[in-house]
Image (cartoon, helix red, strand yellow):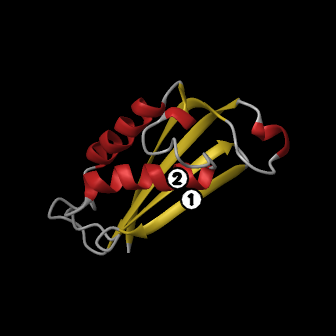
Amino acid sequence: MYEIGVTAQFEAAHRLEGDFGPATRMHGHTYRLEAIVTGNNLRADGTLFDITALHGAVNAIVADLHYRDLGTVEGLHHLNTTAENVARYCWERIAAALRGSGLTTLTVRIWENPQAYAAYSHRLDSA
């Protein structure tokens, strides 16, 4: 299995609902988004996938989330904006750009700080 990945960064604010102590107040993060794709076969040029195209899919979602209140973003406004839910939301957006490309899985990691991340991973052909 081959794997490639890209990262991007965005600044966003959010507040959590529930028993999250001070995180229930509005606060912000410098988020890091990692997108990792896997596949069994290389293309004729020796690559798994066009890394520029993967960067483009990631940069599109990052541009939409940069300097936003995540609780106001269409697709997130009805969810608790935990890192897990943000990872799934980003996965869905990125996956839409990758389907039919011969890739097997997509994993999206959302880092809220250098020590903590949440991830969502799923097969691209069956999600």
Give the crowd class for mark 2: few <14, some 14-19, many >=20 residues within 10 Å.
many
Residue position marked by numbered label 1 in the rendering: 119
The answer to whether 97 is drawn above or below residue 125 in the figure is: above
What residue is shown at x 50% (from left), y 49% (from top)? 34
Q: Secondary structure at mark 2?
A: helix
Where in the figure is residue 77, as x and y percent of width and height?
A: 51, 41
- Judged from this view, the residue extending furthest toward the right is 21
User: Split into 4 quadrants, where in the image is the C terminus?
Assistant: bottom left
**Quadrant in the rendering for residue 49:** bottom left
Where in the figure is residue 95, as x and y percent of width and height?
A: 33, 56
- N-terminal of the pair, mark 1 or mark 2, is 2
Q: Are marks 1 and 2 in contact (CB under 8 Å)?
A: yes
Residue position marked by numbered label 2 in the rendering: 87
> With 56 as the anchor, is 23 left or right in this view?
right
> With 25 as the anchor, is 122 left or right in this view?
left
Kindly report the distance in space between the C-alpha atoms of the residues bearing marks 1 and 2. 6 Å
Where in the figure is residue 107, as x and y percent of width and height?
A: 46, 61
- Kind of residue at badge 2: Ala
Judging depth in this view, the residue of 21 and 122 nearest the camera is 21
Give the crowd class for mark 1: few <14, some 14-19, many >=20 residues within 10 Å.
some
Judging depth in this view, the residue of 108 and 96 nearest the camera is 96
User: Split into 4 quadrants, where in the image is the N terminus?
Assistant: bottom left
